[in-house]
Image (tube, coloured by chain):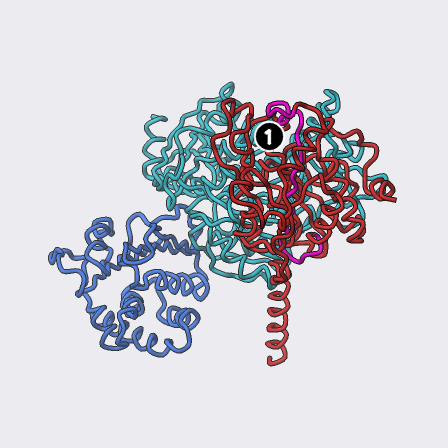
Amino acid sequence: MAKRKIISGNHAVAEAAIKAGCRFFAGYPITPSSEIAEKLSEVLPKYGGRFIQMEDELASMGAVIGASLTGAKVLTATSGPGFSLKQENLGFAIMAEIPVVVVNVQRGGPSTGLPTFTSQQDLMQARWGRHGDQEIIVLMPDSVQETYDLTIRAFNLAEKYRTPVILLSDEVISHMSEPVDIPDEVEIVDRAKPDVPPEEYYPFDSSKGLVPPLAPYGTGYRYHITGLNHDKTGFPSNDPEIVHNQMLRKLNKIRKNTDDIVEVEEFKLKGAKYAIFALGSVGRTAKQTVINLRKEGVPIGVFRPKTLWPFPEKEIIELGKKVEKIFVIELNYGQIIGEVERWVSKYTEVEWYGRATGRLIPPREIGAFIKEKIE
Amino acid sequence: MKTEIVKKYLRLDKMPTVWCPGCGHGIIMGSLLRALELRGRSKNDIALVSGIGCSSRTPGYVDVHTLHTTHGRAIAFATGIKMMKPDMSVIVVMGDGDCAAIGGNHFIHAARRNMDITAVVYNNGIYGMTGGQVSPTTPYDAFATTAPYGQMEPPFDIVELALGAGATYVARSSVHNVPKLDELIVKGIKNNGFSVIDVITPCPIAYGRRNKLTADPMKNMQWVKEVTVPRKKAEEMSEEELRGKWITGVFRDVEHVGLVNLYIELEEKLKRAKENKGEEA
Amino acid sequence: MRHEIQLVGKGGQGVRLASSILSRACGIYDGKNLVETHLYGAAARGGLSESELVISGEEIYYVKVQNPDFLVALSQDAYDEYGAAVKDDGMIIADEFYVKNYNAEDKRLAMFPLTRTALDVVGALIAVNVVTLGVLSALDPELSPESVRSAIKDLVAGKYLDKNLEAFDKGLELGESK
């Protein structure tokens, strides 16, 4: 029997993290994400887990990577300015292939911006905030329930693909409260352990597939990890062929598994002539807009990726082939529109509407925009 | 015997090191390996963490759990390891730039929270790997590629910094006094809290050549001897005489429960409270 | 049907607790869908405190209140800033003590001695939130007074509970008298 509870999005992250097996959190206070740290500081020691408030965002990102190497499932949470600071060691985790979950509760930016108000201005930072080529998994929830479910999924994907996963929430989703059904049992994925003795173990061994096992510290497997480009043993290498092959494996473990990673919600799209492309909290607004417009006879639905990155290329192309227009609505000044156009402009027209004033755009305003564009 | 110890802990297939002729880093690494042997832990129970720089290449050569992280952040990574593996000996090696410039915040906070980590600072007063830029411990008036008219800023005293921030074991030695260095590192690892061993070491190529020492290893080693003064001797010297010198010795060695152990105590307390509650119900 | 309630006051009037109680009453005891959101600010005390509840038997999409069915205004600012958006057939429950300037012609407006009742019954200003919940429960057919009472029992600490339940009952009486 699932247990029904009313909790905020931030508390849903904390509860789901515990459920997913998270036993270490390091963070730094920042609005609007601090409730995640507050809750876990109370709860973690009761589950044999450990919490530490570090001296800054850079350190908290480093600490979770160190803890993950011991085999623990780890979490850190932040918002805009802190997310900028986390990029350095997030890049390290991508390079060294360390499972970590990072929550970024989006607020208005750039810089200190609007600390207590929502935005969707970190869509591209989540994708490209670090230097260098990389793939990254980014999930975006549209409700407290989905925050709970996607937090668990974030841990599972991090473990399965030995990679950082970002849960990209926003101030509205993180602070609002809704009833949530807390399931008794959830699917839990643990990282692969070595199937060879220590002397035959290599932490970046491509012959073990796209995701080589990561041995926890203290289990007899001694190896080297570096942020430098490295060979299968983990030691630095600048041999072009080795660099190329390791880079390709790291990219392909995500690229070749997009079918497994990508999740999309389609709302009233069957037979629709138009579609709204929306993410996270805007997905809720988009659905209300669709309900309103359908009452007026407009055949429209919503396409909402729960997985923002890797981008649902295949799914959006399919949509582009079916509808006459896609309306991209976002709480910024034009970010994901570029990605949508990249995949569908060959097949359909794309219109954009958005702003980042800290508030959600109401359904009637979006409805008016759409009607103007289809008349 | 000493060679055998070094060989036991080295990844011999990774030799030679990246370090230049006359560099003191290999001497510090030798001391560290002997200290590990004296401490007597299994190689599987040791983590060696570093940031970026010449010194930070040390972990690559040592056959324990080794983690070569980002510039200045080694202590942060080490903190995560220690929190989840309290039984492991966690050692951080870092340069003076790593420790006192880009990683300064992590350094003072690890000291404040008495994190059970041993920090060995390879202090050569220069950014060697990037080609000889001025560092936070470059001596006053010394020359560097970014101090072509001489360093105008006073240097950071890493020992004073560690003491002020609350480290429970603080010592300084140099590569000129190796037996002492071995001893200090062992003590540091044994300390149940944050330990700092500041090691004065020469960089003939990036520092020596620009500061009238040439690249000659012997001249640079002589310089290390000249700029380091044991505590006892320093007590009899005037302020004028001590200008530009690094005082060596043990500056603090106290017992104080570190953060990890406090956390374990908390967990046990919560567990007992839960059990008691269960009995009542 | 989508039903919207907005509670607005100053920091320290217990607006947040009142909205948590309503959420629990509707979401747990009545088993309805609901979304509770707040306006956040940097000031921890004294500033505007705003809570929004959207309640529905169906799925709730848009999460913010647009045109409230009920507005509770515990301060002059609350009435001035939020009164206009209330539905034509909606209701504004305003506190006599803090809301002095209002349009007496406004059919939506109902004035109550919320603060005074809190002081009379409990002897503490903070109880104004529970008095208000009583009034609201009596007047809003979407709310079940019994569910709200159960939620108060869950969320109010033991030693304050009796006084709070008394304040709630007093609020119910006030509401029913309208």
- Horizontal side of A267 relative to C99 (left or right) equals right
The quadrant of the picture occupied by the C terminus of chain A is top left
Where does residue B34 sit, x and y in percent of width and height?
79, 46
Is B240 in front, or is A338? B240
The colour of chain A is cyan
- Horizontal side of B245 relative to C38 (left or right) equals right
The colour of chain B is red
Query: Would you name the residue on which mark 1 appears?
Result: B127
Counting every numbered tag in the picture gives 1
The quadrant of the picture occupied by the N terminus of chain A is bottom right
Residue C173 vertical placement versus B171 (above, below): below
Is C128 in front, or is A236? A236
Where does residue A367 sit, x and y in percent of width and height?
35, 35
Residue B1 vertical placement versus A276 (above, below): below
Magenta stretch: includes residue C107? no
Residue B268 vertical placement versus A356 (above, below): below
Say whether residue A257 is visible: no
Chain letter of the residue carrying label 1: B
Which stretch is magenta? B189-213
Alpha-carbon neighbours of circle 1 within 10 Å: few (<14), some, or many (≥20)? many
Residue drawn 14% across the image and 55% down it: C106
Where does residue B136 sit, x and y in percent of width and height?
54, 36
Q: Quadrant of residue C17?
A: bottom left
Instruction: Give, as a three-letter code, the residue at label 1.
Output: Tyr
- Horizontal side of C134 relative to B7 (left or right) equals left
Say whether residue B28 is visible: yes
- Horizontal side of A92 relative to C174 (left or right) equals right
Residue drawn 41% across the image and 72% down it: C150
> In the figure, the blue chain has which letter?
C
Give the residue at the far bottom of this rendering: B280
